[in-house]
């Protein structure tokens, strides 16, 4: 875990500590976006999309939105816009 940036480790800990179950849909969606945007900031839009898909699947109220992320593949050049516009 030493190669994972500190801010990403802390967000991973939040989810592992509570399983996402104490977050409402809006909070969980923002958490998904924040984590995905970290990958965008690192210049890795494909990993951002994978992160978003994975994290959406971790909450009952966002799980059904995972398939929408497949559209994100069309936005690899502008992944930040795709993530921020996701509702």
Image (tube, rainbow, N blue to C red):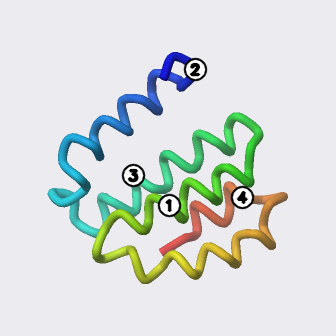
> Could you say which disc has been placed on residue 79 in the image?
4
Image location of residue 80, percent across then percent down? 67, 55
Specify few, some or many for label 3: CA neighbours under 10 Å numbering under 14, 14-19, or 20 or more: many
Q: Which numbered disc, 4 or 1, marks the residue closer to the eye?
A: 1
Q: Earlier in the sequence, mark 4 or mark 3?
A: 3
Residue 76, by quadrant, is bottom right
From the viewer's perspective, is residue 69 above or below residue 37? below
Image location of residue 43, percent across then percent down? 76, 39
Q: Earlier in the sequence, mark 2 or mark 3?
A: 2
Q: Earlier in the sequence, mark 1 or mark 3?
A: 3
Specify few, some or many for label 4: CA neighbours under 10 Å numbering under 14, 14-19, or 20 or more: many
Instruction: Give how far apart the Cα atoms at labels 4 and 3 are.
Output: 16 Å
Q: Which residue is mark 2?
A: 3
From the viewer's perspective, is residue 58 above or below residue 41? below
Residue at figure coordinates x 74%, y 54% from the top left: 46
Instruction: Give how far apart the Cα atoms at labels 2 and 3 are.
Output: 21 Å
Residue at figure coordinates x 61%, y 73% from the top left: 69
SS state under label 1: helix
Residue at figure coordinates x 36%, y 63% from the top left: 58
SS state under label 2: loop
């Amino acid at each position: 875990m030493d190669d994972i940036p500190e801010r990403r480790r802390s967000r991973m800990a939040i989810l592992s500590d509570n399983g996402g179950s104490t977050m409402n849909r809006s909070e969980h969606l923002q958490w998904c976006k924040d984590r995905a945007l970290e990958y965008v900031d690192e210049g890795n839009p494909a990993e951002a999309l994978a992160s978003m898909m994975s994290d959406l699947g971790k909450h009952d109220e966002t799980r059904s939105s995972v398939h929408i992320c497949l559209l994100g593949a069309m936005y690899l050049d502008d992944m930040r816009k795709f993530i921020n516009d996701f509702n």
